[in-house]
Image (cartoon, grey):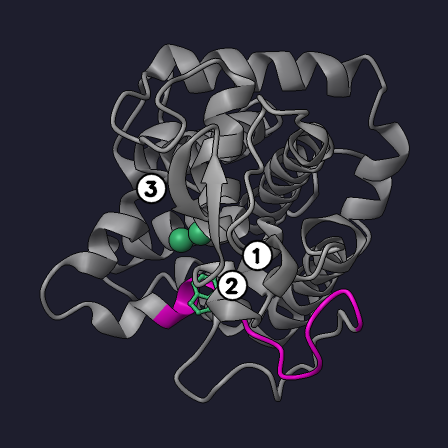
Amino acid sequence: WGKLGHATVASVAQQYLTPNTVKQVQAILGDKSTTYMGNIASWADSFRYEEGNAWSSGLHFVNGHDAPPPESCHLILPEDCPPEGCVVSAIGNYTERVQNKELAAEQRTQALKFIIHFLGDIAQPLHTEAFGEGANNVTVFFDGYKTNLHAAWDTSIPNTMLGISPPTSAANITNADFLGWANNLAAKINQGSYRRDVRRWLRNHRLPANRKGAERAAAAWAQDGNEEVCHYVMKIPGNQLNGTEIGAGAGGDYYKGAAEVVERSIIKGGIRLAGWLNLIFDKRTGFE
Ligand code: ADE
Ligand code: ZN
Ligand code: ZN
């Protein structure tokens, strides 16, 4: 996701943190503002482009190795996660590190910021897909703007859902944008529109959130993101989407379904992030 998607995942999660979790997360982040989660949700993306931090780039996704979608949507873990790491092993690693009181405060802060970011990434279907490097290499047009299918899902579709233009830009996202969207989504959740989904999304949330247990949960999250790629994102094969217009204008059939998948994926990321942080800091998901 771009800045909007990550900050919205984090802000949905913020609404479901237990009081105990809120206290500890605010202390570790050193931020008691109303946007303490959203403020740092994209930190890992700035970090990866700073000198010396290229090692962290591969931690934002996991690529399967089988046939391209929609023929097959299937991750084989741990084989699909290289020794240098992927989003699944990174979630295991940083879940362990944030709980390790022997680490320097700065290290635990970094671990928490990685967790908040990576539970967003793993809910973006194309962060669990190998084809065209997560469709970064699939050129598309979005309401006339030349982009790629990955960036369209990260940024153009979310921006368009909120009426933010241009669709391809992350530059003009305000706190009011992601807080407003997160409030709308929380209202839908609280009205029960996603009740059965919420139960399903938290199925792999277990104590203790140790490294192996965390990796097992993250592997299941990656698998269901990858299934979305076959069901919708690349139901039209990636090579056939290449060069097409997928924006909200011109018919907009692909866009309409995509917006539904994006909404569900952002909520899913937010609910899982809240449940995960509550397990880590309060030994319960908070959705009991
Ligand atoms: N680079 C290679 N594969 C990727 C993916 N699935 N998501 C994001 N970036 C990638
Ligand atoms: Zn992305
Ligand atoms: Zn990322």
Residue at the spot of label 1: 126
274 up-or-down from 55: above or below: above
Q: Measuring from the top left, give residue 103's x and y in whole percent.
A: 28, 65
Count the labels in the image.
3
Residue type (three-letter) at the residue carrying disc 3: Ser
Q: Is residue 34 above or below residue 29?
A: above
To which quarter of the image does residue 42 belong?
top left
Neighbours of disc 3 within 10 Å: few (<14), some (14-19), many (20+): many
Using residue 50 as the reference point, say whether residue 14 is left or right of it: right
Q: What range of the chain is rendered magenta?
A: 58-71
| Element marked by disc 3 | loop
Pick the front one: 115 or 81: 81
Residue projecting furthest to the left: 51
Disc number placed over residue 192 in the picture, else none: none
Q: In the picture, residue 274 is in which quadrant?
A: top right
| Residue occupied by mark 2 | 134
Badge 1 density bin: few <14, some 14–19, many ≥20, Cα 10 Å: many
Q: What secondary structure prevails in the magenta region?
A: loop
Please state which amino acid type lies under the numbered disc 1.
Answer: Leu
Q: Are marks 2 and 1 in contact (CB under 8 Å)?
A: yes
Residue flagged by tag 2: what amino acid is it?
Answer: Gly
In the rendered image, is residue 205 in sight?
A: no
Circle 2 SS class: helix
- Residue in view at x 68 percent, y 74 percent: 68
Q: Quadrant of residue 172?
A: top left
Q: Label 3, on which residue?
A: 42
